[in-house]
Structures are given as C-alpha cells and as structure tokens.
Image (cartoon, helix red, strand yellow):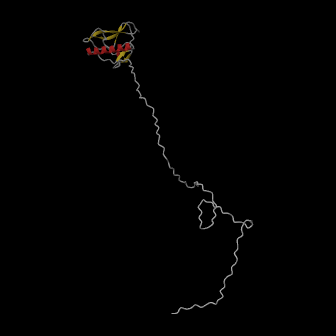
Amino acid sequence: MKAVIFVLTALLAVAGKAHAQCSKVPQYSEKIDPVICPVGNIKLANYENAASYYECVKAGANGTLTSCPTDTYFNYATQQCRTCANYFPSTQCSSLTINVTCVPIATTVAPTAAPTTISTIAPTVAPTSAPTETTVTSAPSTTVTSTTEAPGESTTVPVPPTDAPTSTTTVSDDIITPAGTTISVPQPPSPNDSNVPTPVTPAPTAPVINDTPPTAAVADTV
C-alpha cells in the first residue's frame, strides 16, 4: 500500500513538473480506470501525467505504464511522445471511440502518512493524605441543672428526717424545757399503796370575836 502511494505521489509530482514545463498540457478531468487494453498494439494516454502512457500489447491485458523521453509528452492522436513545441492535447477520455472506462480525476491526492502513535502520559494524581483525627479533651466542668416543674406534673421533694416525737411533761409554766429533752415525771402515789404517808391535818383554830360596841369616829376640830 505504501509503495502504491509513493508511486502516485511521484506521478503527481512529475505531472506537475510537466505542466510547469509545457503550458500546452491541460488539466484533464477524467482518466481511464481500470486500464484494460481494448485492443492490441495501442497506446493509451495517461491523463494524470502527460509525460507517460500505457502500452497495450494484447487485448484484455492490463496496460503497462511507460514514461516518455525527457521533455516530451504523449499525444494520443499521433501515438507518440512529442516536444512541447510540437505537442497538442490528447482526446478527452469520454470522447474516445474505443471501449474504455472513464472515471473522474481527484483534484488533489494527499499522500497518506504512516499513522503516528502518540503516547499519552496519564496525569499524576497527588496522594491524598488521610484525615487526621484530633481528640480534644475538655476540662471537667460543674453543671448546675435547674429543673423546672412542668405543668401537670408533681415533683416530690424529699423531707429531711426528723427526730422521734418526745413526750414532755410540763410541771410549771415558769419552767422551759429545752426542745429534745425528755423529763421523766413519776406517777402520783395510789391510795392503796402501803408506803404512802398520810398528810397531817392541822387542828382547826377558833376565830376571835370582838364583842365591844363600835365607836363613832371623832371629827377633827378646827
């Protein structure tokens, strides 16, 4: 494939040179393709390069590409390569009276370059460091929680324990017994007790009767 491309490129270069050297050589729009000889012993024009032609020896065979001598150009009518001064254009492909296949000529044949392999370097991704865990230790704090009693809820307030009730016997209103002091008061003796002393009853005393007549009060004399 590369060899064919090289040959085509060389032919185009020669054709361009021929056109530059001889202004009588026209730019043809059609060419013979495939180049199969319709009859034997005939020369077919190479419409892509007037400095060469196809030699047909046998009918049905492929034409052999042959170059003209230097500074000469092939003319189909005379079946000869002629100098620029004696040259005139060949008959157009579509106007030939022989059985050939004519196809359009590409205006420009760009040489096919070998494919170029481009190595793509993948971008380097910077390593991502793992996140560092930081432990923050806060100083212990004293929290005073104020509990507000919600509506409809009862709060039980503990009552500090109290001492057991004490029995206090008050002997006199003048005596103040300190709180928390227990005074043991003996029970009164029963009359049936044998050791209970009998109180001494004093003898009655007769009253003194004044049997003198009352005296009138003496008035003060002025």
Outermost residue to the bottom: 222
Residue 155 coordinates in the image, percent (x, y): 57, 54
On screen, residue 214 above or below 128: below
**Left or right: 206 as drawn, with respect to 88:** right
Residue 76 visible at all: no
The answer to which of 187 and 60 lies nearer the viewer is: 187
The answer to which of 192 and 138 lies nearer the viewer is: 192
Q: In which quarter of the image is the N terminus?
A: top left
Residue 81 visible at all: yes
On screen, residue 167 above or below 28: below
Residue 175 coordinates in the image, percent (x, y): 60, 66
The answer to which of 52 and 141 lies nearer the viewer is: 141
Residue 214 coordinates in the image, percent (x, y): 62, 90
The answer to which of 191 and 129 lies nearer the viewer is: 191
**Residue ID at (33%, 10%):** 53
Outermost residue to the left: 85
Total residue callouts: 0
Quadrant of res 169: bottom right
Quadrant of res 199: bottom right
Quadrant of res 212: bottom right
On screen, residue 64 above or below 194: above
Residue 128 coordinates in the image, percent (x, y): 43, 31
